[in-house]
Amino acid sequence: MTRDPYGSPGPVPGSARPPRTAELHLLLRLTLLSFAVNVADSAVQAMVGLSTLLPGLEDAISVPGLPGGGPAAALALFGVVLTTVLYALVWFPLREQQQWGWVLGLVFCSLAVLGDVFDLAVFLLGGHVLPALSTVALVAVNVLWLVVAGRPGVRAALR
């Protein structure tokens, strides 16, 4: 029989994790899928380049010594690094079944969907089909993430 420092029998309160549910496993997989789709979306947008998406911006941020696609590639790389950090802030706490990771994921994912819907409108109005398609995939995965995150099985697995 184990005792906590205060002498009460049984396990220390708060030390036992709730069991992982299938919904939590699905949410963790969707987090990784969303990250992969986000990186692919960034790559598509970098390939299309800033000059076709936002004319004049590439000249305004050009860096001497870098080829024409340099600013677009640099911004894409910065975006991927920032995205990796933000996804890590959600994935690792979720894996450890910590509720604050779930809350942070809800906030980040909701903001991402709003921003991506705006991006989608800009791409469609500008006639940029390839970035629009990759953004549609990203919005779909993130909306699915939000739906799964709201399931009772996910919240039951968090402490």
Image (cartoon, rainbow, N blue to C red):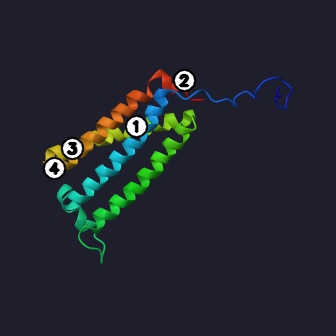
Dot 3, how many residues are within 10 Å of its Cα: few (below 14), some (14-19), or many (20+)?
some
Q: Amino acid at mark 3?
A: Leu
126 on left or right of 36: left
Dot 4, how many residues are within 10 Å of its Cα: few (below 14), some (14-19), or many (20+)?
some
Q: Earlier in the sequence, mark 2 or mark 4?
A: 4
> How far is mark 3 from mark 2, CA to CA?
35 Å
Q: Quadrant of the C terminus?
A: top right
- Mark nearest the camera among 4 and 1 is 1
Instruction: Name, please, the residue furthest toward the front.
Output: 1
Residue 155 drawn above or below residue 123: above
Q: Amino acid at mark 1?
A: Leu
> How far is mark 4 from mark 1, CA to CA?
27 Å
Residue plotted at (34% across, 60% down)? 75
Q: Amino acid at mark 2?
A: Ala
Instruction: Name, please, the residue furthest toward the left.
Output: 127
80 on left or right of 88: left
Res 128 label: 4
Q: Earlier in the sequence, mark 3 or mark 4?
A: 4
Q: Position of residue 28 (x, y in %)?
A: 46, 37
The residue under label 3 is: 133
- Mark nearest the camera among 2 and 4 is 2
Task: For mark 2, give the secondary structure.
Answer: helix
67 on left or right of 27: left
The residue under label 1 is: 30
Residue 1 quadrant: top right
Q: Given contact means CB atoms under 8 Å apart, are the residues at marks 2 and 4 in contact?
A: no
Task: For mark 4, give the secondary structure.
Answer: loop
